[in-house]
Amino acid sequence: SIAQFECKPLVGDDGTTTQTPNGLFRRMKMEICQINAADDYSTNGIQLTTIPSNSTLVANIFFGNGKHSIELQCDDVNLPSVSKENVNGDDSGGKVEQKSRPAKVWRQIGSIQERIVVQIGFKLVAVSNCEGSDETYVIDQVFVSQSAEKA
């Protein structure tokens, strides 16, 4: 499945600059404008768009009131999925426990060599639907670092 999101720099955040081996980079917190993915849930009246663990993730970053945009893609976001493990550590059919997943996970698209890096923070949330309740990941935070030097 494909999960796509759009974001723009957070108003009032001029970012921070950092010197790297590839030159000066500016890191900015982004505002998430829109997310399109396979699953939408409503939890406590809040609409959540969940990101399947093996999604292709497409980030559309808008700058200058939408005059400039960049699209980056990650072919497999590889979020932790629910895993069940036999307590005996074998296939004996004994008691099975569900292993917990981390509450927050970060993924990166791009690189400093490409002169742009998008860091996406995912948060594990509890959701309910007609099939019962579950835990799944949603996009929580996005940061963009890009070269602050003229190309």
Image: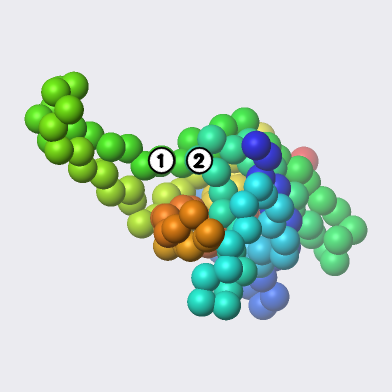
Q: Residue furthest right?
A: 67
Of helix, strand and loop, which one carries label 1? loop
Q: Residue at x 50, y 40 (%)?
A: 53
Can residue 18 be seen at all in this image of the molecule? Answer: no
Q: Quadrant of the N terminus?
A: top right
Asked where in the image residue 67 lies, by quadrant, the reply is bottom right
Proximity of marks 1 and 2: CB atoms separated by less than 8 Å = yes
Q: Amino acid at mark 1?
A: Ser
Residue appearing at x 63%, y 58% in the figure? 40
Q: Which is more toward the observer, 81 or 121?
A: 81
| Position of residue 43 measured from the top left corner of the image (x, y, whole percent) | 52, 70
In the figure, is residue 40 to the left or right of 104? right
Q: Which residue is mark 1?
A: 81
- Please say if 108 is above or below 128: above
CA–CA distance in space, label 1 to label 2 = 6 Å
In the displayed structure image, the side of residue 6 where residue 57 appears, left or right: left
